[in-house]
Image: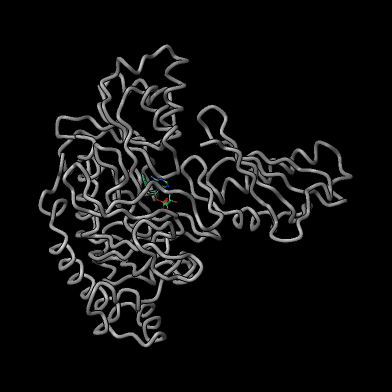
Amino acid sequence: MIWNEQFETMPTNELRKFQLQNLKELVLRVYNRVPFYKEQMDKKGIKPSDIKSLEDIQKLPFITKTDMRDVYPYGLLATDMSEIVEIHASSGTTGKPVVDAYTQKDIEIWSEVMARTLSMGDTTKSDIVHNAYGYGLFTGGFGVHYGARKIGATVIPISGGNTKRQLSVMKDFGSSVLTCTPSYSLYLAEAARELGLDFSKFPIKAGFFGAEPWSENMRKEIESKLHLKAIDIYGLTEIIGPGVAAECECQDMLHIFEDHFYPEIIDPVTGQQLEDGKEGELVFTTLTKEGTPVIRYRTRDITYLNREKCRCGRTSVRMHRIMGRTDDMLIVRGVNLFPSQVEQVLLKIDGVEPHYQILVDRKGALDSLEVRVEMNETLFSDEIRYIENKEKEIEHALKEELLVHSKVKLVEPKSIERSEGKAKRVIDVRNI
Ligand code: DLL
């Protein structure tokens, strides 16, 4: 079901005009209001009046997660703080989160794009949406919430965790739509089986899964175990949260809501735009955002674009499901983390060397994280109990920084393989 016929099926030439108008206004606005953008544009010798066509976007500088961290927390604000009504954030590379500040209009846009997303799996006002994405600074919970409310559906804001309770609420309240990470949906299926609950008897018809990579195989598994249609939804905090792109009922690539988020694919090494169909790094410009607009944000996500018309009638450009990343960001149980964050924690702990390895596995449906760290000679010669306590101390410190639990294993000095080039910090054996 198409939520917004006007924009979702807009003829391409009209859409381009709309995008260009918004791009020009955006560039002018940030040039005048955000010193960061003015400096960057001045450095490149670009003035807002140089943006005369959509192709001219290539003249503008990129922005990265690191740039955002450098201007933390409010350096990208393009409105008065009094216009901001809500803030969300996600993890940055070294602990400082990336901040997204929303005006009332931004929240309305978010509700709109999430209403479009949920409508793709035929969510209507008669549905009961079991929303198991986390509520809080993470954008998943609130994004789905606003979209479901906009449609007029009933939202169950259950948030993450407490799987048994999730299942009984789902059963008792008659949830017809499920929203959570794809891996958590499989965990729900596993837990249901153990409790003797049968998903085929639940009225759930669709699930909207994202926030982490998944595959066609996982889709098949989820659809057969949970008896629902599994839809891939994509988004990121820097742009708005979920609601940047989503699959329609055809489940054939994700429609980008390009009237709000202008996509480009670039070569991650040269930064040059690549033609449609070529795999590269996804870059977004927020055409309509007021609070913290971004120009040419390098997502580090790898995909390609397809402009063929979809059978559903929507005219928007589609992107292939995310195929990987150009950096070392890991997503473990839906939480983004970087090896550099682990390193930062270890550097503050006595008795260990900065030689470590991160092992990521998936046992059943749940991700597990193990951090192996080398002890120094002094710690190594200590009593076993002391070493065990040290492991607990590091586990605790890592949990504080990463927000997910990891098992810490202290290993003998010099036992982690040294590498001549780039150290192999992460061993990810999840078969997604
Ligand atoms: O994960 C927003 C979101 C919430 C999307 C709920 C979908 C559903 P961040 O925490 O900022 O935001 O993480 C963004 O997660 O750059 C991708 O690497 C990854 N990601 C998000 N959705 C998908 C997906 C939310 N469908 C980062 N497939 C992004 C693969 C995804 N990766």
The spot of residue 164 in percent (x, y) is 42, 22
Q: Residue at x 49, y 39 (%)?
A: 333
Which residue is at the front of the view, 266 or 122? 266
Residue 297 place in picture, x, y as percent: 39, 65
In this orientation, which residue lies closer to the viewer: 339 or 102? 339
| Above-or-below relation of 67 to 31 | above
The one nearer the camera, 265 or 138, is 265
Q: How is the image coloured?
A: one colour
Up the image or down, 273 lies above or below 119; here it is below
Residue 320: where, in percent of width, then height?
37, 48
- Where is residue 23 shown, x and y percent of the image? 23, 71
Q: Quadrant of the N terminus?
A: top left
Outermost residue toward the right?
A: 381
Quarter occupied by residue 385: top right
Position of residue 399 in the picture relative to residue 138 (left or right):
right
Q: Residue at x 21, y 49 (%)?
A: 309
Determine the residue located farthest toward the left in the rendered image: 6
